[in-house]
């Protein structure tokens, strides 16, 4: 099966969140299942800087954007574990950030991703790749299914192509004013509420939802949640119309990339059977943030984008009460400047007890996962969540709000039966968070049963092996029912 896999971000070349992790690790699992893959992403400035091994293929694509022809070149990383191509168009992608800076989203994001989508469609012809499946990820690729079914319908390379669209977070929709629409080259007939128009805007996400053969999202519970008004972000009607083609497949993680037994960037290595090194990582983390709280107490951490979705305001409201407990607290995150300010101030207010790093750092994230005892994730909503899966792999027990993928992956600890892998709360209030944190702290001090819990948590299998097989089944379904 030939699969064209398209994502606006792919780890290790570019990353703003979990989508990059998925797009960088799912293809590795798929290539072990007899798939012939071609993966495509934009060639951003960060990719250019960090990956000198990426080379020009000598091939070009040219697409129409409104009345203009815009050219791009195709690059390739010869050292990738799967065929990895990039579309280079410096005016669009050679920028400091992927989608926007401190001022907000880049104002030409519609144009950038119209170009990217069309360039991807041209790339197959130029490279002689005949996809059976195009697997698109998130709004930035939402026009590809439309192009496949309209402007590119008669191209030989796409004669047998079906399309699967994965929504990693329905809240990001790529909705733009109508004045951007002309750049798509699509007929104005498609600009109506049954197709690409969404409450007066032209929506990339809606395009993907309507024109794909199969839609997936990243956990079973989130799949059910987004069919309801409260979580549907206005798309619930569109999704209900596609209910038979909407599936939830829980994300996995690359268990080699996230492996405390082999991780060179942490203070000591450890595994479920030999957890001795975890103590070294805890001490290293406390030292890094100059925390003076005794290591006998639990280390509570958060690694997150500092945005409303992640329930950050709940932590802020509970923070003074958290500080009344015998715990140390570490946060790594970046995002909303107001939230960033709050946490910077907490580290000043509680010196020696709170460690805060505002920014995005893979190495520091690993140090924190490895040193953490309790991983806090009080999300308002959560499509799947990868951080709790990574935290578990590093022996940090999740304390989560029971929503979306967190319901599917974190099961309440029951000390009597000795089952479960974390601590969960339902209400969105500081009291709910604090009560649950208190239960977790109490359990932490029961050394024997805590050790068993940590071992069990670390032994869980969240690798891509079985989700990748489900994707293959879905690809087959999409090919079978191609519209
Ligand atoms: P989302 O995609 O909504 O941000 P996920 O839990 O799916 O959340 O994935 C987040 C990914 O981004 C994880 O790999 C996590 O380790 C990483 N991450 C989040 N914030 C930071 C940060 N400040 N520094 C380094 N890595 C981060």
Image (cartoon, rainbow, N blue to C red):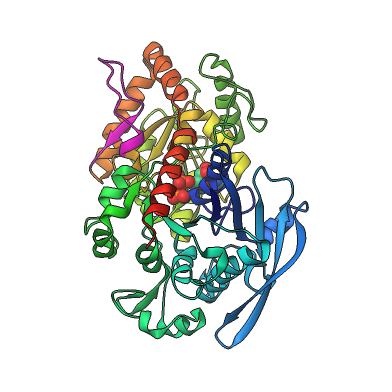
200 lies left or right of 12 = left
> Is 175 or 292 nearer to us in this picture?
175
x 25%, y 45%: residue:
429
The chief SS type of the magenta part is loop
123 lies left or right of 30 = right
- Whole-percent x and y of residue 257? 60, 35
Q: Residue furthest top?
A: 448
| In the rendered image, the vertical position of residue 75 relative to residue 464, given as above or below | below
x 45%, y 58%: residue:
162
Residue 167 visible at all: no
Residue 409 visible at all: yes
64 lies left or right of 424 = right
> Is 442 or 67 nearer to us in this picture?
67
> Is 458 or 461 nearer to us in this picture?
461
x 34%, y 39%: residue:
406
Give the quadrant of the C terminus: bottom left
x 56%, y 44%: residue:
35
443 lies left or right of 348 = left
Instruction: Report if residue 420 lies within the magenta region.
Output: yes
Instruction: Report if residue 135 lies within the magenta region.
Output: no
- Whole-percent x and y of residue 182? 48, 85
| In the rendered image, the vertical position of residue 184 relative to residue 251, given as above or below | below
> Is 282 or 10 nearer to us in this picture?
10
- Whole-percent x and y of residue 125? 63, 66
Q: Quadrant of residue 426?
A: top left
Q: Which residues are magenta?
A: 407-426
| In the rendered image, the vertical position of residue 212 relative to residue 196, given as above or below | above
């Amino acid at each position: 099966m030939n699969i064209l896999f398209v994502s606006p971000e792919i780890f290790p070349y570019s990353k703003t969140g979990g989508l990059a992790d998925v797009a960088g690790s799912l293809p590795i699992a798929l290539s072990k299942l007899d798939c012939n893959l071609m993966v495509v992403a934009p060639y951003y400035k960060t990719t250019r800087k960090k990956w000198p091994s990426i080379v020009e293929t000598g091939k070009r694509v040219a697409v129409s954007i409104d009345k203009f022809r815009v050219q791009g070149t195709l690059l390739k990383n010869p050292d990738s574990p799967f065929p990895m191509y990039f579309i280079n168009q410096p005016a669009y992608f050679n920028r400091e950030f992927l989608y926007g800076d401190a001022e907000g989203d880049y104002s030409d994001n519609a144009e950038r991703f119209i170009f990217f989508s069309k360039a991807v469609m041209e790339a197959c012809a130029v490279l002689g790749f005949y996809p059976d499946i195009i697997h698109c990820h998130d709004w930035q690729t939402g026009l590809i299914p439309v192009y496949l079914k309209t402007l590119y319908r008669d191209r030989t390379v796409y004669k047998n192509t079906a399309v699967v669209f994965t929504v990693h977070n329905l809240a990001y929709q790529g909705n733009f004013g109508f004045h951007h629409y002309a750049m798509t080259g699509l007929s104005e007939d498609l600009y109506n509420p049954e197709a690409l128009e969404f409450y007066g805007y032209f929506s990339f996400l809606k395009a993907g939802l309507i024109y794909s053969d199969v839609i997936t999202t990243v956990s079973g519970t989130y799949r059910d949640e987004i069919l309801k008004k409260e979580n549907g972000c206005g798309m619930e009607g569109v999704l209900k119309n596609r209910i038979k083609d909407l599936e939830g497949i829980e994300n996995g993680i690359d268990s080699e990339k996230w492996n405390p037994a082999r991780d060179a960037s942490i203070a000591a290595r450890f595994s479920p059977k030999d957890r001795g090194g975890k103590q070294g990582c805890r001490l290293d983390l406390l030292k890094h943030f100059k925390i003076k709280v005794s290591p006998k107490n639990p280390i509570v951490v958060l690694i997150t984008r500092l945005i409303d979705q992640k329930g950050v305001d709940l932590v802020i409201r509970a923070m003074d009460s958290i500080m009344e407990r015998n715990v140390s607290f570490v946060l790594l995150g970046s995002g909303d400047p107001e939230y960033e300010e709050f946490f910077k101030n907490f580290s000043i207010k509680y010196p020696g007890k709170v460690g805060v790093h505002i920014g995005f750092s893979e190495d520091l994230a690993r140090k924190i996962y490895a040193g953490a005892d309790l991983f806090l994730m009080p999300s308002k909503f959560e499509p799947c969540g990868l951080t709790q899966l990574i935290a578990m792999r590093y022996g940090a027990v999740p304390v989560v709000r029971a929503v979306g993928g967190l319901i599917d992956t974190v099961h309440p600890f029951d000390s009597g039966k000795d089952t479960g892998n974390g601590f969960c709360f339902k209400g969105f209030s500081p009291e709910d968070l604090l009560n649950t944190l208190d239960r977790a702290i109490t359990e932490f001090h029961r050394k024997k049963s805590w050790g068993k819990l940590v071992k069990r948590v670390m032994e869980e299998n969240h690798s891509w092996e079985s989700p990748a097989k489900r994707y293959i089944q879905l690809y087959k379904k999409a090919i079978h029912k191609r519209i």
